[in-house]
Amino acid sequence: MYLYKNDNETYFINKKGKTFDFYYDKNQLQENCYYYVLKTRNCIYEVIEKTNASWIPKEKKSYWLNFYSPMGNFEKILLLPIGYVVLLVGLWDFFMLKGLEKILGGIMVINSLYFIGYDLIYKIKLKKSNNGVDNTNFLKFNDIIKNTILIILSYILCFIFIKIFMGLSSFFAKLIFLPFVGCGLCTLGLAISESVRNYQLKNIFLKAYIIIFLIYWFGFLIFWTILIVKQEENILYALFSISF
């Protein structure tokens, strides 16, 4: 057995990562060393002698209490079950509902499967590795999956906006909704340019998105201000728009 000891805890650990409590004078044992012991299933009741073993201990970690993601590693926190709950809710929405709820359910399924799969692969790599996990391949994989998801979501968003836009009957309603279509197309362009690493094209789509948003924001603000002033017949109401 390998003796793990620090300021807060002391326990033995075997090759499979299982830990054992023991009732022995801890001050007589040297930390980070190997010992022959007598034990029961879960507890060590006698330490016999020190040995010269050289295997590397791997502490067995709970599957549910550890969550590894592209945003960071979270240990001893109950986050992973939330991913499975989101997956189940997404599957229910995707198979049982219709329309926009069905699309949102599919998005929930894709996102939860991605994070659950990333966590599972990371844990398998961690179990096989002696010196930790090299994140280089994980980061490349994360970029590919992230860009793919962004393109899919942007495409779905554009599809929804265009479908709503085509369903509008009046010219004024289409004019009001047109900036949403433009921003959706710019978002799709941003996702595609990011995936192909064309940063010049990305800047063009980003600037177009900002311009469309500003035109819509100030256009709506001016229209709203004129409408309020006409209704109330008081130009002082225009002062309230300055803060926006």
Image (cartoon, rainbow, N blue to C red):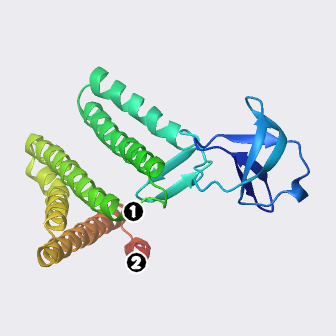
Q: What amino acid does circle 1 point to?
A: Asp
Helix, strand or loop status at disc 2: helix
The x and y percentages for residue 143 are: 27, 60
Q: What amino acid does circle 2 point to?
A: Ile
Helix, strand or loop status at disc 1: loop
Disc marking residue 33: none
Query: Quadrant of the rendered structure where residue 168 is?
Result: top left
Circle 1: is it few (<14), some (14-19), or many (20+) Cα within 10 Å?
Answer: few
Residue 114 appears left or right of 209: right
Q: Nearer the viewer, residue 79 or 107?
A: 79
Query: Quadrant of the rendered structure where residue 236 is?
Result: bottom left
Residue position marked by numbered label 1 in the rendering: 134
Q: Nearer the viewer, residue 36 or 183?
A: 36
The x and y percentages for residue 242 are: 40, 78
Q: CA distance from mark 2 to mark 1?
A: 53 Å
- In terms of sequence position, does the residue under pointer 2 or pointer 1 come before the other? 1
Residue position marked by numbered label 2 in the rendering: 242
Circle 2: is it few (<14), some (14-19), or many (20+) Cα within 10 Å?
Answer: few
